[in-house]
Image (tube, grey):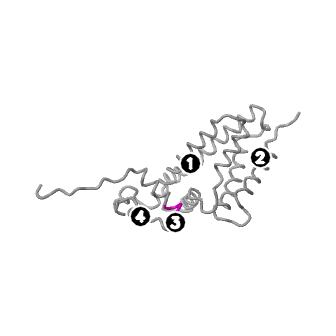
């Protein structure tokens, strides 16, 4: 080899790239997140990013999966914590509901699911999205089943009740995330609390 060898700047770890993408969404929203802008932020070319992530759809899904890993760790802490099962259920709900309008995780979640309607999205990508939802559902079913077995909750079908509760949470959460008038976080938590009181209050008999 003749001449001085070019010194290459090593690419940042993939987790750093995903964390930077999430930070950009939190600060500027999805509209400012482009391959070029992210590349400038982490010191990579847009072509280099495309080599690693193939497309913006894949970048967004990987970022969502990374964000879910962080939430999943917090969810496990909540579910493994001491205290009553209803306290842990309330903590699960608190973790589920967005912090407020333009919550970055929910902003990303909505965008990824909206893009998944495209016929061009691979089946494997949809399966990865479904895996995210399954983890939340599975943990909720286990928590409900624990509460029923301990007599803290009414004897409901935990899988069916979890499906209804998550549908309620998703609907309210979308309202919070888009800033729908009359759907602030405190009101949503109050509505969900009433739903849980009505649906799970143990029989006195």
Mark 1: secondary structure? helix
Q: Which residues are magenta?
A: 24-29
Residue 171 location in percent, x, y?
Answer: 69, 58
Work out how far the residue at label 3 is from the one at label 2, CA to CA, in angstroms. 36 Å
Which quadrant of the rendered structure holds the N terminus? bottom left
Q: Which residue is mark 3?
A: 28
Lower sequence index among marks 4 and 3: 3
Residue 61 location in percent, x, y?
Answer: 49, 55
Q: Residue furthest left?
A: 2
Mark 4: secondary structure? helix
Would you identify the image quadrant in which residue 173 lies? bottom right
176 relative to 42 in the view: left or right:
right
Indicate whether 108 appears above or below 71.
below
Work out how far the residue at label 2 is from the one at label 4, CA to CA, in angstroms. 43 Å
Lower sequence index among marks 3 and 2: 3
Q: Are marks 4 and 3 in contact (CB under 8 Å)?
A: no
Work out how far the residue at label 1 is from the one at label 3, CA to CA, in angstroms. 25 Å
Looking at this view, is 142 or 30 the one in front? 30
Residue located at (64% from left, 48% from top):
95
22 relative to 157 in the view: left or right:
left
Lower sequence index among marks 1 and 4: 4
Q: Residue furthest top?
A: 150
Q: Which residue is mark 4?
A: 35
Looking at this view, is 199 or 31 the one in front? 31
């Amino acid at each position: 080899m003749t001449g001085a060898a070019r010194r290459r700047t090593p690419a940042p770890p993939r987790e750093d790239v995903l964390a930077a993408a999430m930070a950009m969404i939190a600060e500027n929203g999805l509209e400012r997140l482009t391959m070029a802008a992210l590349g400038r932020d982490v010191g990579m070319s847009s072509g280099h990013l495309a080599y690693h992530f193939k497309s913006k759809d894949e970048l967004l899904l990987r970022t969502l999966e990374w964000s879910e890993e962080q939430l999943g760790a917090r969810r496990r802490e909540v579910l493994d914590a001491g205290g009553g099962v209803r306290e842990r259920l309330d903590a699960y709900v608190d973790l589920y509901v967005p912090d407020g309008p333009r919550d970055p995780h929910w902003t990303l979640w909505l965008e990824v699911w909206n893009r998944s309607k495209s016929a061009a999205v691979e089946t494997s990508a949809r399966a990865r999205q479904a895996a995210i939802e399954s983890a939340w559902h599975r943990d909720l079913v286990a928590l409900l089943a624990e509460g029923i077995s301990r007599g803290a909750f009414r004897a409901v079908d935990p899988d069916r009740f979890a499906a209804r509760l998550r549908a309620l949470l998703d609907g309210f959460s979308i309202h919070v995330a888009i800033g729908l008038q009359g759907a602030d976080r405190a009101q949503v938590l109050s509505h969900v609390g009433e739903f849980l009181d009505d649906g799970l209050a143990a029989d006195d008999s």
